[in-house]
Structure formats: C-alpha cells, structure tokens
Image: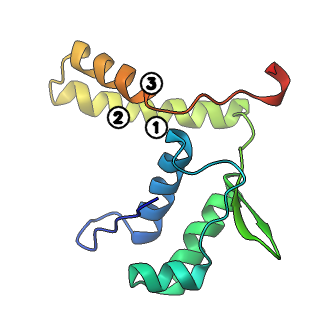
Amino acid sequence: MLLEINTRSEIPIYQQLSEQIIMGIATGELALGESLPTVRQLADELGVNTMTISKSYNQLKEAGYLITDRRKGSIVTMPDAYHEKEKNNFKKRLAQLLAEAKIHQLEVTELTAFIDKTWSSFADFKSEESQ
C-alpha cells in the first residue's frame, strides 16, 4: 500500500496516516493479519519523525485496527463492531458532514451515488458470528 503524505495539509500527518491505513483495510489493500512496516522503516520511507508514525499506530491500536506482536510488529486486525456509544458518535460525525454537504448545496442524488460507489469499493467483512 502506497501512503501519501501532504505536508501542506491542515490535517496532521499522523491523522493522514491513520485515515489512509483505515481506508487500506476497508478496500482490502491491507489484508487482515498483514504486518505493517516498523515505525522506523515507515518514518524513513516517508521522511517523517518516528513519533509521528508511533502516534498513528497507537491511535489505530486503541481503535482496534492494529495489534502488536513482539516478533511480527504491528498487524492489521478487525475491530469490534460499534457499541451504542460509538455508533452515536459516528452518527454525529456523519450528521456534521451531511450538514456541510447540504449547506454547500450538494444534490442528494450526487451524494447517494457517491456513497453507493464508495461503499461498493470496500471489501466485504463478515463478523465471526455471521459465518
């Protein structure tokens, strides 16, 4: 997976990394069980501070997207399904984005087409309970 950092973005680099890794998991570019580069390797590759990579990896670990194995490093994993509080937080964030779209006069047909296209680009994840 190719990670791209925009140093001119208002979005912090660690957050850009986290978002791209989550997108890589969702699209299947990063497979469950796949090992990510070490903090040092990725920092060297991207030309950023190791603390930036570490912050991103820790954020992803806390959110359940990564686990750490002493021998294998950071490994992609499947986070738990949202609990009610997390689901409500997600709905609030989504409502904010929809409010912005409405204010900027984005047509609902364009929005739903974008949602459908994006959703279909993601890998099909099934929980262990439904298998």
Disc 3 marks which amino acid?
Answer: Ser
For image coordinates 47% across by 58% down, the residue present is 1
Residue 113, position as x, y percentages in the image = 29, 18
Badge 1 marks a residue whose secondary structure is helix
Is 52 drawn above or below residue 86 in the view shown? below
The residue closer to the viewer here, 11 or 45, is 45
State the residue at coordinates (44%, 24%): 120
Q: Alpha carbon of mark 2 to alpha carbon of mark 3: how far?
A: 20 Å
Q: CA distance from mark 2 to mark 1?
A: 6 Å
Residue drawn where x is 81% and y is 21% of the image:
131
Instruction: Please tell me which of labels 1 and 3 falls first in the chain.
Output: 1
Residue at the farthest top position: 109
Task: Measure the C-alpha gap from mark 1 to mark 3.
Answer: 21 Å
Badge 3: how crowded within 10 Å, few (<14), some, or many (20+)?
A: few
The residue labelled by disc 1 is 93
Seen in the image, is 88 located left or right of residue 95?
right
For label 2, the SS is helix
**Of the residues under marks 2 and 3, which one precedes in the sequence?**
2
Indicate the amino acid at tag 2: Leu
Front-lying residue, 18 or 24: 24
Mark 2 touches mark 1? (CB < 8 Å)? yes
106 versus 72 height, above or below: above
Q: Residue at x 16, y 30 (%)?
A: 104
Q: Which residue is mark 3?
A: 120
Nearest the viewer among 77 and 1 is 1
| Residue 71 rendering spot, x and y as whole percentages | 82, 76
Residue 26 position by quadrant: top right
72 or 115, which lies in front? 72
Q: Which residue is mark 2?
A: 97
